[in-house]
Amino acid sequence: MHDDHIQADHSGAEHRTAEPEFADGQFYADPHAAYRRWRTEGGARKVRFGGAAGLEGWVVTGHAECRAALTDPRLSKKAVTEAFARHVGNSEGGPGRDLMTHMLNSDPPEHTRLRKLVQQAYTGRQVATLRPMVERHVNALLDQLDGPDPVELISEFALPLPLAVVFELFGAPQAERENLQVRGNAVDADPEDDGEADGAADGGADGEVSVETAEGMADYLRALVDHKRTHPGDDLISELLAAQADGDRLTEAEITSMAFLLAIAGHQSTVNLITNGIHALLRHPGQLAALRADPALLPGAIEEVLRYESPFSIASLRRTTEPVTIAGTTIPAGEFVQIALLAANRDPAVFTDPDRFDITRPDATRHLAFGHGIHHCLGAQLGRLQAEVAFTELLRRFPALRLAEPAEPAQWQENPRHRGLLNLRVLLH
């Protein structure tokens, strides 16, 4: 770790010009400790994740500062996309380029156009009407787990669930969904990847998948979009094709990119929400007992999980288009900014006793787990619905649900973007 060299200009703003602090394996085991220190020291801190070759950026940790940064137009998404495209030599198009043309990688006015068209299709399907479909998938997966042996809840339940839901939303033929789930389950904890709000990865690395997996899924989605163009149905792809505003429509590349975004990055947030929540409840038996005694506490419990162990640790990357001062620290133009949602959601200036897990916390909804502002997560309610059904059925069907190795410490992904477990072994009976 390197000490900062801080200079102050005539306005009193600090310019941190130090070598970055490195986030190593110890950071991933307990990022809350580092975030607590950085938040106490104030301002923004330059951090490099993933060792000497990793991504370097300014990390913002306070709740008020993060909330403001999420809506600051000087922190650009498009500038990140352009920087990554130049880095990989893909600025003029080519393989994977059409997977970047979604709203999370754009700024107004293009973001405004895309969000208006996508929201017309996406929110037209009221989330409440999807509950029977989600319940069907949850129970089908749980039927396969019912036995005396330990169950790895991530690979056998939390990973396949959101993929099954999203591909049914897309109107993918039943016979193809098993193959799609195999592709979608090829999940890598890519330290350069990201997802947040609108749901995707930064700069063009659109999800938690290898290049081969991404290209294969993209090819499938292009074919599905083409099929739905001539054979529309009651599904999200068909509605995206039909959406229009002021004579404008989404292009085929924009629809493919949005579908990829929902299938991969949206999937990761739901996986982490479900597994982080079950893990937190099993590690806090008093809270679990309270929830079992009063299932009406479940909506608040989900919000507390989102606050306590946010599925995304850091929001999708921004890049400064001009010097920006955050909490007294001036960040030069052309720098990456990383907004630490996990840190904001444990800020004691907002949450009393923030390191305590409390499913009755009255202000848990002040969390920033799904972002804030124009990039607030479009799929937030669908993620909440899947978590609600998953928790309800797991606790109802398995009253003896418990950790298989309660004495073992949790193993977390070494990924600065995601707060997700590597495994979650449980006993059902």
Image (cartoon, rainbow, N blue to C red):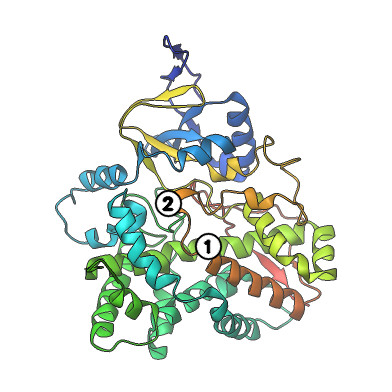
Estimate the x, y position of residue 200 in percent, counting from the top left: 40, 57
For the residue pair 404 and 368, the one nearer the viewer reads as: 368
Q: Residue at 75% x, 57% y: name it.
A: 359
Q: Earlier in the sequence, mark 1 or mark 2?
A: 2
Q: Residue at 48% x, 58% y: name it.
A: 377
Q: Is residue 406 in view from this perspective? A: no
For the residue pair 135 and 423, the one nearer the viewer reads as: 135
Which quarter of the picture shows residue 385?
A: bottom right
Label 2 Cα crowd, 10 Å radius (few <14 / some 14-19 / many 20+): some
SS of the residue at dot 2?
A: helix
Estimate the x, y position of residue 124 in percent, counting from the top left: 44, 74
Residue type (three-letter) at the residue carrying disc 1: Ala
Q: Quadrant of the C terminus?
A: bottom right
Residue farthest left in this picture: 92
Q: Is residue 168 in view from this perspective? A: yes
- Which mark is nearer the camera, 1 or 2? 2
Estimate the x, y position of residue 95 in percent, counting from the top left: 20, 61
Residue 121 versus residue 351 in the image, above or below: below
SS of the residue at dot 1?
A: helix
Q: Label 2: which residue?
A: 374
Residue type (three-letter) at the residue carrying disc 2: Ile
Residue farthest front in this picture: 246
Q: Label 1: which residue?
A: 380
Q: Residue at 64% x, 36% y: name it.
A: 33
Estimate the x, y position of residue 267 in percent, counting from the top left: 48, 66
